[in-house]
Amino acid sequence: MSFPFADVSGASLAELISLAGRRAVVTGGAQGLGKAIAERLAEAGADIVVVDINEEPARAAAAELAERYGVTAIGTRADVSDTASVVAAADLALAELGGLDIWVNNAGLFPNAPVLQMPDDMWDRVFEVNARGVFLGSREAARRMTADGSGGVIVNIISTAGFQVAFPGMAAYVASKHAARGLTKSLAVDLAPLGVRVLGVAPSFVPTEGNIAAAKAGAEQAAAAGVEMPALDVMSHSRIGRLGTPDDIARVVLFAASDLSLIMTGSTLLADAGETL
């Protein structure tokens, strides 16, 4: 069996990190980690489709990328848990960018509730986005990456919750992120012969708009149920003396998406400041 991955040992560092001429999709790309990831990919030269459940912020983020980095950038709405919506986003990348080389499954939900108080619809929605969304995005990306034999890279944003349970009330989130981590491994096995690498990046808690709001909502719900939940300042056990920033994670994603990591597939890289040691 032939595996279409070139040896790039002779390439310069600038060539290895460059994404010039490559086409990327970033889900959940309008703010937080997704926006930081899209910025670094664009800075490296990639044309970008910014996908988000909220269309106007996605368009605004894309316009900012185009102006700052001189790349083609398009913002569009998509619900990553809906097949037709994901298909439309993937088709848009082909139509507007001319192909698809990188797909970042970043969109996710971070609700927390004590298991005895967790409603069915919370559990279901977390899995729809955090697990089904990764599957749908990966499948549609791989179908397009392999149609002409060009291959590509899929990067799944996992979490340290794919390795451990940081505090109570995380049942749905932890289970969904373990599922996404396992899916990353399985996708890598299926897609390597077709020239597609699949990697995970697992951040610890990063104080983005969405994460802070979700953590606050979870703490309020727990308090109403008489359950004590931890404050944000104990959600990270950083060994480097600070919480991570969105750009800390974006730089790891850039490594995963570029030829710097060409030898890697199936791994999930811990971007956690040593939290899971």
Image (tube, rainbow, N blue to C red):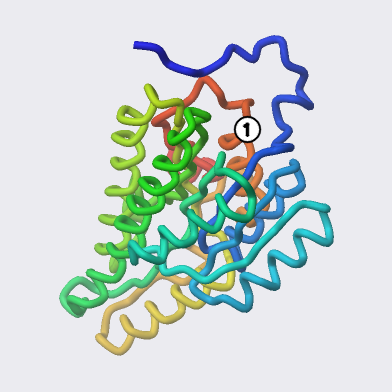
In this view of the protein, which residue sits in the foreground, 186 or 168? 186
Residue at the spot 38% in from the left edge and 85% down from the top edge: 220
Amino acid type of disc 1? Ser
Q: Looking at the rendering, in which quadrant would you find the N terminus? A: top left
In this view of the protein, which residue sits in the foreground, 54 or 265? 54
In this view of the protein, which residue sits in the foreground, 111 or 63? 63
Residue at the spot 31% in from the left edge and 81% down from the top edge: 222
**Neighbours of disc 1 within 10 Å: few (<14), some (14-19), many (20+):** many
Whole-percent x and y of residue 114?
Answer: 24, 73
Q: How many marks?
A: 1
Residue at the spot 46% in from the left edge and 79% down from the top edge: 216
Whole-percent x and y of residue 191?
Answer: 36, 30
Whole-percent x and y of residue 75?
Answer: 62, 66
Give left or right: position of 172 versus 72: left
Q: Looking at the rendering, in which quadrant would you find the C terminus? A: top left
Q: Is residue 45 above or below residue 131?
A: above
Give left or right: position of 71 versus 5: right
Q: Which residue is mark 1?
A: 258
Residue 276 is drawn in which quadrant?
A: top left
Residue 34 is drawn in which quadrant?
A: bottom right
Q: Is residue 76 above or below residue 163?
A: below
Give left or right: position of 138 versus 253: left
Q: Residue furthest bottom?
A: 224
Whole-percent x and y of residue 79?
Answer: 42, 69
Asked which secondary structure carries label 1, the reply is loop
In this view of the protein, which residue sits in the foreground, 247 or 149? 149
Residue at the spot 52% in from the left edge and 71% down from the top edge: 77
Give left or right: position of 47 versus 94: right
